[in-house]
């Protein structure tokens, strides 16, 4: 069991989105760009055979576009307040917010940051479409390092440099510049 939510068992998790503990206002119309393709490099061989494919990891979702339908005055006011929560404060680190949604969690996206907020635009039936563009947030991880290199032996240049430094110290003590 992968832990992914089946849309037939949990339709509410697929029809709503929570970012940073706040419901995304309106009715979700579409979620695009939450794919995370695998990166491959293909190297040709010297002849017809001996070609290789090298896996280089998985890309991050860089442009997740969410469009919701604002259907009344309250959902429009909620979208305004929601936008203020998402936007980074100048001079501070942009927020990385936890996200709960079936589509995003399906591809293991759990934290996002805002890239763009699209102002409401007219839609069918006296409603408005409101859009947000997100990117997957993946914090930097410390890279494990191996044991320290053993001290290197003194080379001829190191010995001569030390000898030169000693002579310069003696010269400065005798009053030479």
Image: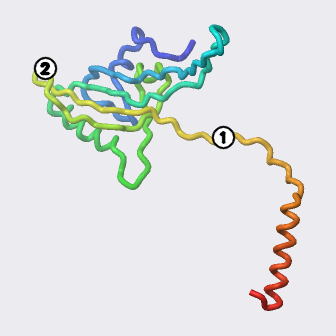
Furthest-front residue in this view: 47
Q: What's the residue at 41%, 46% (across, down)?
A: 94
Q: What's the residue at 40%, 12% (across, down)?
A: 7
Vertically, is 23 above or below 161? above
Side (left or right) of 89 relative to 4:
left
Q: Which mark is drawn over residue 48?
A: none
Secondary element at tag 1 = loop
Vertically, is 105 above or below 115? above
Q: What's the residue at 65%, 8% (across, down)?
A: 49
Residue nearest the viewer, comparing 5 with 49: 49
Residue 59 locus on image (x, y percent): 50, 27
Vertically, is 78 above or below 67? below
Side (left or right) of 149 relative to 113:
right
Q: Residues within 10 Å of mark 2 (few under 14, many from 20)?
A: few
In terms of image quadrants, where is residue 155?
A: bottom right
- Disc 1/disc 2 C-alpha distance (Å): 51 Å
Residue identified by numbered label 2:
124
Residue nearest the viewer, comparing 129 with 26: 129
Residue 124 locus on image (x, y percent): 13, 20
> In terms of sequence position, does the residue under pointer 1 or pointer 2 come before the other?
2
Quadrant in which the C terminus is drawn: bottom right
Q: Nearer the viewer, mark 1 or mark 2?
A: 1
Q: What's the residue at 83%, 73% (across, down)?
A: 164
Residue nearest the viewer, comparing 43 with 73: 43
Side (left or right) of 111 relative to 55:
left
Secondary element at tag 2 = loop
Q: Residues within 10 Å of mark 1 (few under 14, many from 20)?
A: few
Quadrant in which the N terminus is drawn: top right
In terms of image quadrants, where is residue 62?
A: top left
Residue identified by numbered label 1:
143
């Amino acid at each position: 069991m992968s832990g992914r939510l089946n849309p037939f068992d949990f339709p509410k998790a697929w029809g709503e989105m929570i970012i940073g503990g706040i419901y995304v206002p309106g009715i979700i119309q579409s979620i695009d760009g939450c794919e995370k393709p695998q990166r491959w490099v293909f190297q040709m061989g010297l002849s017809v055979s001996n070609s290789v494919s090298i896996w280089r990891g998985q890309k991050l979702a860089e442009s997740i576009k969410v469009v919701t339908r604002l259907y009344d005055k309250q959902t429009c006011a909620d979208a305004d307040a929601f936008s203020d929560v998402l936007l980074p404060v100048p001079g501070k680190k942009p927020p990385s917010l936890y996200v709960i949604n079936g589509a995003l969690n399906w591809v293991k996206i759990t934290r996002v940051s805002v890239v763009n907020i699209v102002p409401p635009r007219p839609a069918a039936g006296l409603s408005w479409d409101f859009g947000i563009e997100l990117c997957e947030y993946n914090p930097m991880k410390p890279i494990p390092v191996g044991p320290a290199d053993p001290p290197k032996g003194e080379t001829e240049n190191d010995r001569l440099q030390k000898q030169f430094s000693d002579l310069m110290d003696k010269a400065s003590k005798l009053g030479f510049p």
